[in-house]
Image: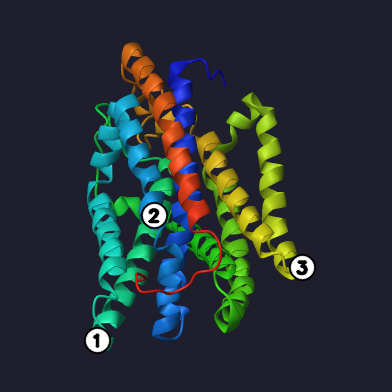
């Protein structure tokens, strides 16, 4: 893989951006998924405030990814957004619902009001995660795109068993990731109870992980073809397995920080393997391989890619610096004060 090739560079940068989003927004989506398990208003507020200063900054990575995809690969952007138009509308409403649930929940002390927004927060987080997983599953398995890049058939065709299985894996991975994060940010009885969720969630993740891996090898044979071209990628497979294995080890030895970092590593490895399954494709056509969109036939002009690369080199340090500062300022255990949600 030659990163000096502008097309390959932009594919790699998209991978970096979606990895950052999956890790950072992954844990606060997971917090939303497990939110109904928390007891009482005070504990629910603690859970919300554990991500309160972070969730909107985490979504910057998704916005940047969308902008980079549009600028670098406009044809793929148009085809994918057209193919997933209705699911993306659901995704947009779920992202909005999640945001307003966090902001509105504590505006009044009405029990009905807070219960409604609690359910809205959890449901929106679940829908967002599931839809991202289903989209990833379809991207790997293939979308019925014609020669013009338009999807043929019904949107219901996107809800096949394999994409739904990948969506299920995304949900349990986010739930585990969020739980490991919450265990770091809480204390006392709440932390102890959250600690009890980790083993069942890891068991559910392991079943989904093994199931999707076997299904991918059996149903999507092209997903492993790049390993012949890039044998060093097997090292990431090994690191992925080690990261998965280290989660229960860290939990057992009472090292919550190490468990969370292992969860971050396994998510990064999964995103890398997703990219390996696609490269150099951006959209795989299930109708005819000739209709596939790749990093060359879906790209902007060389001049545009070169200009955007310069902008990326200037902008990425600001994104990284902002992220680092926010996480440093709000480090430590979550506390409630007059400005809390």
Q: Upstream in the sequence, badge 2 or badge 1?
A: 1
Q: Indicate which disc residue 186 carries.
A: none
Query: Dividing the picture into quarters, in which one does residue 309 lie?
Result: top left
Crowd tier of the residue under label 2, counting other residues whose Cα lies within 10 Å: few below 14, some 14–19, many 20 or above: few
Where's residue 64, x and y in %? 35, 38
Residue placed furthest toward the front = 338
**Mark 2 and 3 residues: CB-CB less than 8 Å, in contact?**
no
Where's residue 293, x and y in %? 36, 27
Mark in front: 2 vs 1: 1
Q: Is residue 87 left or right of residue 250?
A: left
Q: Upstream in the sequence, badge 2 or badge 3?
A: 2
Crowd tier of the residue under label 3, counting other residues whose Cα lies within 10 Å: few below 14, some 14–19, many 20 or above: few
Q: Indicate which disc residue 160 carries.
A: 2
The answer to whether residue 151 is visible is yes
Question: Judging from the image, what secondary structure is the residue with disc 2 in?
Answer: loop
Question: Judging from the image, what secondary structure is the residue with disc 3 in?
Answer: loop
Q: Is residue 198 left or right of residue 58?
A: right
The residue pinned by badge 3 equals 253
Q: Indicate which disc residue 110 carries.
A: 1
């Amino acid at each position: 893989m030659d990163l000096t090739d502008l097309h390959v560079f932009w594919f790699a940068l998209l991978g970096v951006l979606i990895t950052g989003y999956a890790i950072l927004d992954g844990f606060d989506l997971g917090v939303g998924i497990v939110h109904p398990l928390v007891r009482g208003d005070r504990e629910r507020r603690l859970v919300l405030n554990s991500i309160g200063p972070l969730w909107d900054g985490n979504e910057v990575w998704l916005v940047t990814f969308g902008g980079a995809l549009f600028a670098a690969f406009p044809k793929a952007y148009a085809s994918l957004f057209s193919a997933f138009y209705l699911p993306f509308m659901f995704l947009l409403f779920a992202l909005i619902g999640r945001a307003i649930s966090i902001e509105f929940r504590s505006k009044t002390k009405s029990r009905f009001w807070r219960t409604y927004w609690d359910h809205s927060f959890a449901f929106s987080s679940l829908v967002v995660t599931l839809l991202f997983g289903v989209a990833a599953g379809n991207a790997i398995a293939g979308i019925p795109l014609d020669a013009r890049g338009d999807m043929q058939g019904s949107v219901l065709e996107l809800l096949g068993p394999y994409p739904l299985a990948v969506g299920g894996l995304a949900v349990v991975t986010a739930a585990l990731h969020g739980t490991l994060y919450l265990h770091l940010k809480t204390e006392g009885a709440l932390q102890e109870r959250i600690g009890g969720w980790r083993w069942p969630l890891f068991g559910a993740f392991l079943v989904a992980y093994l199931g999707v891996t076997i299904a991918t090898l059996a149903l999507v044979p092209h997903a492993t073809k790049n390993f012949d071209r890039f044998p060093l990628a097997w090292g990431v497979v090994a690191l992925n397995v080690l990261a998965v294995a280290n989660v229960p080890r860290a939990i057992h030895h009472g090292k919550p920080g190490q468990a969370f970092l292992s969860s971050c590593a396994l998510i990064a490895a999964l995103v890398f393997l997703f990219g390996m399954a696609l490269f150099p494709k951006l959209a795989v056509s299930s109708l005819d391989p000739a209709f596939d969109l790749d990093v060359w036939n879906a790209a902007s002009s060389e001049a545009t890619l070169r200009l955007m690369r310069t902008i990326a080199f200037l902008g990425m340090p600001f994104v990284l610096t902002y992220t680092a500062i926010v996480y440093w300022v709000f480090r430590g255990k979550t506390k409630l004060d007059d400005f809390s949600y």
